[in-house]
Image: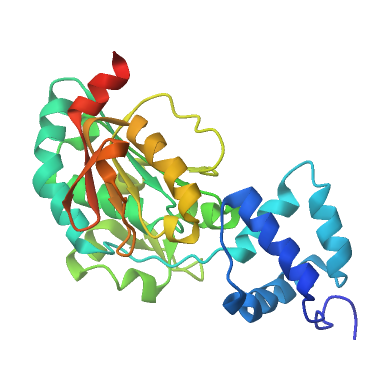
Amino acid sequence: MDQATSPAPDLTDHQFALLCDIAKTEAGLMISSSKRQMIQSRLARHLRKLRRSDIDVYLKDIASDKTGSLTGGLISVLTTNVSSFFREKHHFEIFERELLPNMIVKARSGGKVRIWSAGCSSGQEPYSIAMMLIKRVPDIASLDFKILGTDIDHEIIARAREGLYSDDEANTLPDVDRKMFMERSPQSPRGNKIVTRASGLVSIRPLNLLQKWPMKQQFDAIFCRNVLIYFDAETQQSLWPRFCAALHDDGYLFLGHSERIQNSKSYGFSPCGVTTYHKNRQHGAQRKS
């Protein structure tokens, strides 16, 4: 049995602790002991792919990794990417009802509309936003609407940029949307491709939420759903004011179904729906003064 196919040994307590420390330091991820077997299985597959078998040497190489490629590969192993089109539909309904009318007025008056999908996974969220916009704004190609999708996982970012989805993934879309926004791509194992008029509204970029955010413009809406559940309370609390600063006055922040901003007003937000938060105009004015 060669190095590429030999099973990786069980993680020792020390090795697992090192992995948890890397996950927390590099990506803010909290890994519980209950996930040890899952992490061990994923890591074994990852090491076989890299043709490695010595976990200790691998961890030492990550500690001295200057390019970030090894570390990024490990973070990809440790993160869970689950997504579907129009997931948590109530957020899209709030967006369409409460935000979109003002966005259309803004764009048709020559303004810029910017939307951020933070933790976009394989792209279904930003592409769902694009589909909704196209259906509601037929002349969107002549207006300045842009959607940014970001994720820490470089492998999943590559998938999102391709905009290719399996039949099972595509079938999470209603029939009318699938026919309107997907075309067959038989040369790919994932044979359904997002059409250009939808993908053209979306830019996909790698981004670690714990590091500096390079975006200079504020956003009208931010979707950061089912990402912060992997962070501890201290890390979450450090991100709330950053999200607030990244939003225009009266902007909206959408979180995942089990995520909440405790004492939201102290961070400049008011709850306005299920896991939906509105940036207080007064807070924005105070920041500028």
Image coordinates of residue 200 in percent, x first then y, are 35, 41
Image coordinates of residue 198 in percent, x first then y, are 30, 47
Q: Which quarter of the rendered picture does the N terminus lie within? A: bottom right
Q: From this viewpoint, is residue 22 visible?
A: yes
- The residue at the far top in this view is 289
214 w.r.t. 192: above or below: above
Horizontal side of 137 relative to 258 (left or right) equals left
The residue closer to the viewer here, 282 or 173, is: 282
Residue at the location (61% across, 60% down)?
76
Horizontal side of 140 relative to 45 (left or right) equals left
Image coordinates of residue 206 in percent, x first then y, are 54, 44
269 w.r.t. 11: above or below: above
The residue closer to the viewer here, 208 or 112, is: 208
Q: Which quarter of the rendered picture does the C terminus lie within? A: top left
The residue closer to the viewer here, 10 or 108, is: 10
Q: In which image quadrant can residue 45 be found? A: bottom right
Residue at the location (56% across, 61% down)?
30
Horizontal side of 142 relative to 184 (left or right) equals left
